[in-house]
Amino acid sequence: MTDHRPLGVVIATRDRRDRLAGTLRNLLELPERPEILVADNASADGTRAMVARDFPEVRLLALPVNHGALARTHGARALGTPYVAFSDDDSWWAPGALARAAELFEAHPRLGLIAARTLVGPAADPDPLNDVLAGSPLGPAPDLPGTQVLGFLACGAVVRRSAYLDAGGFHRLLFFGGEETLLA
């Protein structure tokens, strides 16, 4: 199914039904109304039934085994939107962030990935990685917005789907934890 919205969200999850429900509620309230796809890594806690029952507007990709981070790539292939934002089952996007990302991709054809500023916890503290990425030795490029980065945080990244898939997406070598390194 190809959606006409320019940007969708892929969430990889496994056995975190309650956290996922909170994330889905937050994402469904976004003014951008992105298509949302949950790539379920063979959960055994009722995640699939909860998504089908409580969130019928969310697409569910029921993977037969736990693919770890590779579930994001399966989700991006299935989603079909030109731009894909990734969320974890306990993270979501701020209102307006996805619209801004789509604008940046439209304005900058060479742009392949946006590493968003990430806020953590109830106090919305800046993730220390924000400063690391902003201080990248690659610096800016004249045809790209912001600083070119050497890495990113998956749950705070938006990708041009074609570039992401052309690069191979996340690799099965790193199941979870550091999976961004191989893709970067």
Image (tube, helix red, strand yellow):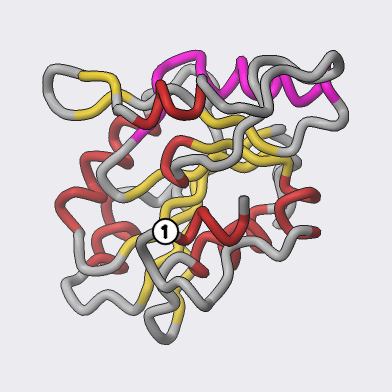
Q: Nearer the viewer, residue 38 or 89?
A: 89
Q: Quadrant of residue 1?
A: bottom right
Q: Is residue 183 left or right of residue 1?
A: left
Decide: is 165 above or below 88.
below
Residue 13 occupies quadrant: bottom left
The residue sitting at 27% across, 75% down in the picture is: 43
Residue underneath mark 1: 178
Amino acid type at circle 1 is Gly
Give me the residue at 30% from left, 27% from top.
127
Magenta-tinted stretch = 92-108
- Residue 18: horizontal and vertical position, in percent? 15, 52
Foreground residue among 6 and 50: 6
> Is residue 98 highlighted in magenta?
yes
Q: Residue at x 26, y 50 (%)?
A: 20
Callout 1 secondary element: loop
Q: Quadrant of residue 39?
A: bottom left
Which residue does the image show at 23% across and 28% down from the upper left?
A: 120
Residue 7 is covered by the magenta coloring: no
In the current view of this chain or complex, which residue is farthest to the bottom? 64
* Residue 24, x across and y down, in percent: 32, 41
Tell me the chief SS of the magenta region.
helix
Label 1 Cα crowd, 10 Å radius (few <14 / some 14-19 / many 20+): some
From the top left corner, tell me how far across and down residue 124 is, in percent: 21, 19
What is the x, y in percent for residue 109?
Answer: 87, 28
